[in-house]
Image (spheres, rainbow, N blue to C red):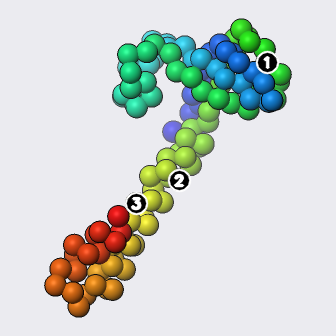
Amino acid sequence: MVEEEIIEEGLVIKSENGIAEIQLRETKECEECTAKLFCKPGEEKTKLISAADPFGTAKGDVVKISVKGSNILKATILLYGIPLIILVISIFVGLILFSESAQPEMYSFLSAI
């Protein structure tokens, strides 16, 4: 996954102040992707994203966007891994703090949430 690169093609809908709003096109790979439920939860065939625009694109320009696999891995760790670690540590700390109570597991779980 680290060596992979995802390339998407899209149409610039709006570009101002160095930020471009891009409407991504659905490709044949989208139908085979297992993440399509999260990427495109509705019935729409397109997705909108905002991206930094160092090239000064204009409305109507066709652009390609690439994301390296290493960046996807980093984002996944930040979004899911760190909160999971914090949750588990909070549960254990809660078990220590609430060890004298009648239901330490419930209180530690609630405090972790």
The vertical placement of 80 against 31, above or below, is below
Amino acid under disc 2: Leu
Label 3 belongs to which residue? 84
**Residue neighbourhood size for the residue with mark 1, other residues' Cα within 10 Å, grouped as few (<14), some (14–19), many (≥20):** some
| Residue at 67 percent of width and 15 percent of height | 13
Distance Cα–Cα, label 1 vs label 3 = 39 Å
Can you tell which mark lies on residue 78?
A: 2
Mark nearer the N terminus (2 vs 1): 1
Residue projecting furthest to the top: 60
Mark nearer the N terminus (1 vs 3): 1
Mark nearer the N terminus (2 vs 3): 2
Amino acid under disc 1: Thr
Where residue 51 sits: x, y (%)?
68, 30
Q: Nearer the viewer, mark 2 or mark 1?
A: 1
**Helix, strand or loop for disc 1:** loop
Amino acid under disc 3: Leu
Where residue 110 sits: x, y (%)?
29, 69
Label 1 belongs to which residue? 57
**Residue neighbourhood size for the residue with mark 3, other residues' Cα within 10 Å, grouped as few (<14), some (14–19), many (≥20):** few
| Residue at 69 percent of width and 15 percent of height | 12
Distance Cα–Cα, label 2 vs label 1 = 30 Å
Q: Look at the image and tell me in which quarter the C terminus lies.
A: bottom left
The vertical placement of 103 against 10, above or below, is below
